[in-house]
Amino acid sequence: MRGLRRIEEARKEARRTIELAPASPVAHTFLGDCELDQRHFTLARASYFTAAELDQRLLWPRLGIAASYQRETNLGAAERTYLIIEKDFPEEATRVRILVASMLVSGQRYDDALTLYQGISEKEALSPPLLRRLMQAGRAYSLEKLERQEEAEYFWNQLVEEFPSGFDGGRRDREVVSQAFETLARIYDAKGESKRSDRLLEKACQEVGMSFSLYASLAERQRSAGKLEGAVSTVRQGLKGLAEDEDMVTATQKVLPIFRSAASGRVSALVRSQTLEILADLAGHVKRAAPPSYAAYLNLARGEALLRQNSQALDHLRQAVEKGFGGMRQAARDPDFKGIAGEPAFRAFSETP
């Protein structure tokens, strides 16, 4: 469940397991991972420390402690923790060095990170495969930041080429490979090779569960080229594997151009129906995620107003106002809301001080 980003379900399951087996270091570590996924760093470390005390030879919670410091941007504490782990687990030195290198990348120490990556043999067997993917991505990213573009492109390509079709593994693997696809598309665009970028993104988006921004990027290319039906199909594919912790502000923002195109032109009944399905799907995700920002609700209201889903648009506008949106007077002149501007409830919103 956690690998599929069903984080809250995974956390509940971890707590149930601890109730049944309070001395299980694995259960405490799993709970730590769930807390870390939700950026509850102190709670995550508490679970990891409990697990480490229960089994001092278990690597997993020790790495979790370091990761919690790293994601909290306490890089000094993370580095010290990794050094202790490497000393206590010499047989895991390669794994630890890859993670240390990723920490150096997050701290913008690209030369130091590259030195570590270069010290690890390309032929060394790494398990799980995610470790190799992290190494390739970190190395490519560092090279790019150091303006060694050709070498960076080589490692991004290597990462993409090694990713198996129909991959059914963890979410994190897909996130790393999605980054490679998006970066390569940007590199090809900069070279004037837009058709090559299109082919690359089309290949990536045949998979389910890649980063939503990947599907949104291809969909926008298709929409801009007048292929609205293809754009709608691509977004629907992306929504099939949308992560529970997806940034719904960004996701709803990226799909708005499709709603505008579907509303402004003559489209088939099928495209309109599928566009409404996208809108309903996004609304369901926003409801479950309950983001604190008003922006996701406002984006939904825009899409619903454009597609003449007036009651839903007014409901989401109301939620946006409750979340702090203060631009209703300007919204009355916004072309996205033209279709509901005559609604009494909309006028009441826009006239409220």
Image: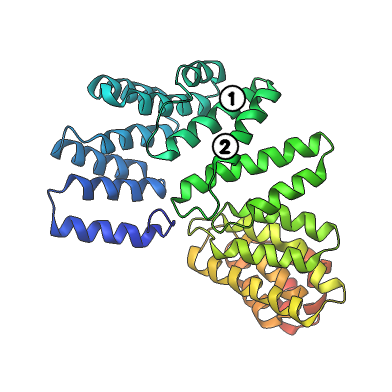
| Vertical comparison of 193 with 282: above or below | above
Tell me the quarter of the image containing the N terminus. Answer: bottom left
The amino acid type of the residue labelled 1 equals: Ser
Residue at the spot of label 2: 159
Q: Earlier in the sequence, mark 2 or mark 1?
A: 1
Q: Who is closer to the viewer here, 275 or 178?
A: 178
- Residue 68 in the image: x percent, y percent? 37, 37
Residue in front for this viewpoint, 351 or 27: 27
Along the line of sight, the residue nearer the viewer: 193 or 16: 193
Judged from this view, the residue extending furthest toward the front is 123
Residue located at (45% from left, 21% from top) = 121
Q: Residue at x 67, y 82 (%)?
A: 311
Q: Residues within 10 Å of mark 2 (few under 14, many from 20)?
A: many
Q: Which residue is mark 1?
A: 142
Query: Relative to 66, is 339 on the left or the right?
Result: right
Label 1 neighbour load within 10 Å: few <14, some 14-19, many 20+: many
